Image: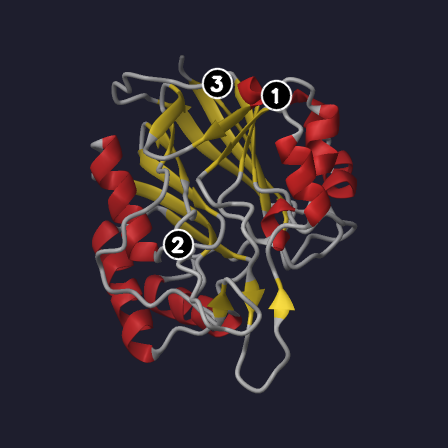
């Protein structure tokens, strides 16, 4: 199925006037006759912002979780309660306990809340898909599944599976969504814990489409050192996307650097309320679809 693809940012760390600001991320996508929600923010902004933007969450057919942190999963009970037929897609391990343990500071739980896990576990099996490998939600709309880490990017942080900081969290449930458009692939990410380079190259490899039309979402560059920033900029220049929309956890300094090095016509800082027209969906021959 083909058709014009559109994306609207619903939750972000910045917002247009009249919308709630929240440390979190959620994006509403309409493409190929499908209505999808990628992530759900921390839970306080999703419903109000969606209503203000004229988005009917009850119409969601698929809800994709990029990974299991609270600031991406908190609104899941709200959307699953109204979207009676929506299927939830998440990689293995999304519900595990997770902690942020910065040196010299108390540990903080950052995994999905207990009530969110309970809501997910209460879903009938037909409404839960564990994404272990790439799959297509529909022709031209794909999920990477867990993203291999081959580039050497240190995209992590003080993330652990226990409050004593004894076991590092590999964040191996991190996944991204892509859309195959006439201009190339548009990649939508939550936090890019697998690394921006790893994520984009995974999409290019799995989709079979080299041309990157755009990248939207959290790039997790807020703590990136100069070497990683320079490498990210070099790769972005090589991919030559038409637009880059850094959101959420990208980091103000990194966003400024991207804007300076790539140009303001390419880098458009994200905010809740931002609408993007992605052009016509042009599937590249996906063989399987789920949901």
User: In front: 267, or 38?
Assistant: 38
Give SS at disc 3. Answer: loop
Image coordinates for residue 166, horizontal then vertical, percent: 46, 72
Looking at the figure, which quarter contains the N terminus? top left
**Quadrant of the rendered structure where residue 282 is?**
top left
Mark 3–mark 2 distance (CA, rounded to whole Å): 34 Å
Marks 1 and 3, Cα distance to the nearest angstrom? 13 Å
| Spatial separation of the CA atoms under disc 1 and disc 2 | 43 Å
Q: Which residue is mark 3?
A: 291
Residue 122 drawn above or below residue 252 = above
Q: Residues within 10 Å of mark 2 (few under 14, many from 20)?
A: some
Residue 129 left/right relative to 86 = left
Residue that badge 2 annotates: 266
- Neighbour class for label 3 at 10 Å: few (<14), some, many (≥20)? some
Residue for badge 1 = 124
Does residue 71 appear left or right of residue 242 in this picture?
A: right
Q: Residue furthest top?
A: 1
Q: Can you tell which of label 1 and label 2 is closer to the viewer?
A: 1
Answer whether residue 211 is visible to the viewer in this image. Answer: no
Residue 247, x across and y down, in percent:
53, 56
Left or right side of 280 for 74: right
Q: Secondary structure at mark 1?
A: loop
Q: Of label 1 and label 2, which has the lower sequence position? A: 1
- Picture coordinates of residue 65 (x, y %)? 53, 40
């Amino acid at each position: 199925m083909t058709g014009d693809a559109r994306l609207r940012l619903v939750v972000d760390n910045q917002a247009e006037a009249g919308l709630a600001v929240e440390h979190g991320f959620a994006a509403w996508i309409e493409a190929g006759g499908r209505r999808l929600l990628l992530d759900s923010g921390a839970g306080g902004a999703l419903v109000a912002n969606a209503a203000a933007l004229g988005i009917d969450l009850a119409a969601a057919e698929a809800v994709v979780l990029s990974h299991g942190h609270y600031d991406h999963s908190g609104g899941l009970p709200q959307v699953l309660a109204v979207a009676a037929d929506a299927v939830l897609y998440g990689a293995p391990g999304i519900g595990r306990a997770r902690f942020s343990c910065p040196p010299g500071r108390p540990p903080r739980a950052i995994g999905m809340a207990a009530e969110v896990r309970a809501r997910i576990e209460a879903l009938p099996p037909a409404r839960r898909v564990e994404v272990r490998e790439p799959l297509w939600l529909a022709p031209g709309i794909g999920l990477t599944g867990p993203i291999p880490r081959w580039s050497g990017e240190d995209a992590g942080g003080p993330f652990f599976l226990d409050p004593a900081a004894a076991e590092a969290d590999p964040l191996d449930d991190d996944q991204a969504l892509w859309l195959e458009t006439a201009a190339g692939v548009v990649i939508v990410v939550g936090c890019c814990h697998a690394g921006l380079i790893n994520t984009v190259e995974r999409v290019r490899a799995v989709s079979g489409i080299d041309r990157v039309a755009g990248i939207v979402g959290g790039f997790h560059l807020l703590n990136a050192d100069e070497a990683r920033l320079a490498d990210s900029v070099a790769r972005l220049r090589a991919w030559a996307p038409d637009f880059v929309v850094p959101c959420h956890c990208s980091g103000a300094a990194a966003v400024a650097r991207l804007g300076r090095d790539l140009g303001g016509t390419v880098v458009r800082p994200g905010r809740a309320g931002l609408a993007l027209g992605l052009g016509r969906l042009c599937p590249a021959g996906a063989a399987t679809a789920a949901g």
